[in-house]
Amino acid sequence: MMDGEKVDLALFYRDASGYLAGATRSPVGYFAFEDDSSGALAGDTQRCPAVWLTLRWDFAVLQRFWPDYRLEPARTSLLLRTLVQDARVGKLFVEPHLQPQFWVEDQKIRFQGCRAARHDDHIHLQL
């Protein structure tokens, strides 16, 4: 729905030298998914059954082409804490396997479900 009340926010990244201002792993900011702690791409897909007619694509073939950037958890955590404290923010979609490293728990931070687009390459914000 195009109501002007939703926006996707890029995650913060770093490399061996430190924080990378304005960098994303993919040139469009999407489809460079973050591994979960098990090492499997999007371990949450084990929880979500493989079904046809879904937006939950993994684009596994593309993953090797993205730069070897790592998440910058401190900056992302600050962003999430700031957003959950804002009364205008209704929902934030973040993949469950990413949330623990950001040290933020709140009822506004949710899993978008198994049939929706993944959110381990960006944060989805809804007012």
Image (cartoon, helix red, strand yellow):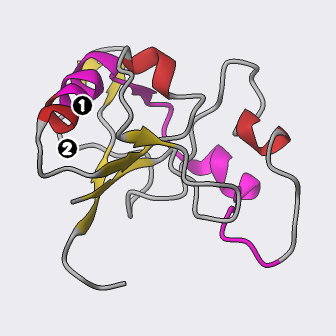
Residue indicated by mark 2: 22
Q: Residues within 10 Å of mark 1 (few under 14, many from 20)?
A: some
Position in image of residue 25 (x %, y %): 43, 45
Position in image of residue 26 (x %, y %): 44, 54
The residue drawn where x is 87% and y is 53% is 49
Left or right relative to 64: residue 119? left
Position in image of residue 3 (x %, y %): 24, 82
> Marks 1 and 2, Cα distance to the nearest angstrom?
6 Å
Q: Look at the numbered discs 1 and 2 and tell me whether their residues touch, using CB distance below 8 Å.
A: yes
Left or right relative to 123: residue 54? right
Above-or-below relation of 87 to 6: above
Residue 95 found in image quarter = top right
Position in image of residue 60 (x %, y %): 74, 53
Q: Quadrant of the C terminus?
A: bottom left
The residue drawn where x is 47% and y is 47% is 121
Residue 86 found in image quarter = top left
Badge 2 amino acid: Gly
Q: Quadrant of the N terminus?
A: bottom left
Q: How many marks?
A: 2
Left or right relative to 97: residue 110? left
Disc 1 on helix, strand or loop? loop
- Along the line of sight, which residue is nearer the eye, 9 or 89? 89
- Residue 23 visible in rendering: yes
- Along the line of sight, which residue is nearer the eye, 108 or 69? 108
The segment highlighted magenta reads 53-81
Residue 39 found in image quarter = top right
Badge 1 amino acid: Leu
Disc number placed over residue 107 in the picture, else none: none
The residue drawn where x is 55% and y is 53% is 112
Above-or-below relation of 96 to 116: above
Residue indicated by mark 1: 20
